Amino acid sequence: MATKILITADDYGMSEPVNQAIEACLAAGAMQATCVMTNMPAYHACAVLRKTFPNASIGLHWTLTQGKPVLPLAKVTSLTNPDGQFFQFSEFRRRWLTGRINRSEVVAELRAQDQRFRELAG
């Protein structure tokens, strides 16, 4: 029995060079899927991914520990540091375990990331 492997590239949207590398791999057939981080600087390029690579699987890479939130900072104060960035994973985990992460902010931010993804890549 043959085994199939699906190779997925995370972090589309992280930067233009990351996007270019993922697109080159998709074009070469080296991978069949990518996940878009809609809160990162180069996320907007996902708007043409489905047209350019119609056979690729394009999904959402949710994040609460990298970059800046999609929502205004005032709506996610328990998720961000004074610089407006998400807390790094270790700090997020520490804050989660001590009850300092507002669950409704988590839900709202993840919904905002999903909405942005659906608007651009849907």
Image (cartoon, rainbow, N blue to C red):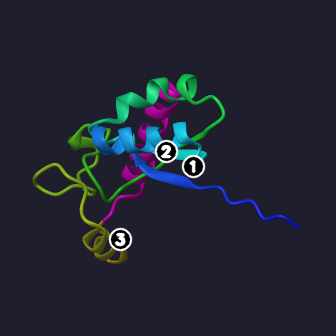
Spot the residue most to the front. Answer: 28
| Disc nearest the viewer among 1 and 3 | 1
Residue at 28% over, 74% down: 90
**Occupied quadrant, residue 38:** top left
Q: Nearer the viewer, residue 112 or 74?
A: 112
> For the N terminus, which image quadrant?
bottom right
Q: Amino acid at mark 2?
A: Cys
Q: Nearer the viewer, residue 13 or 88?
A: 13
Q: Nearer the viewer, residue 93 or 117?
A: 117
Reading the image, the residue beneath label 1 is 31
Q: Do labels 2 and 3 touch, CB within 8 Å?
A: no
Badge 3 element? helix
Q: Which mark is residue 106?
A: none
Q: Main secondary structure of the magenta part?
A: helix
**Magenta segment, which residues?**
101-122
Reading the image, the residue beneath label 3 is 96
In the rendered structure, the answer to whether residue 67 lies left or right of residue 104 reads left
Of the two numbered discs 1 and 3 on the same chain, state the one appearing first in sequence.
1
Q: Which mark is residue 25?
A: 2
Residue 27 x/y as whole percent: 53, 36
Question: Please, is residue 94 above or below residue 4 in the view?
Answer: below
> For the C terminus, which image quadrant?
top right
Residue at 29% over, 56% down: 66
Residue 31 is at least partly visible in this image: yes
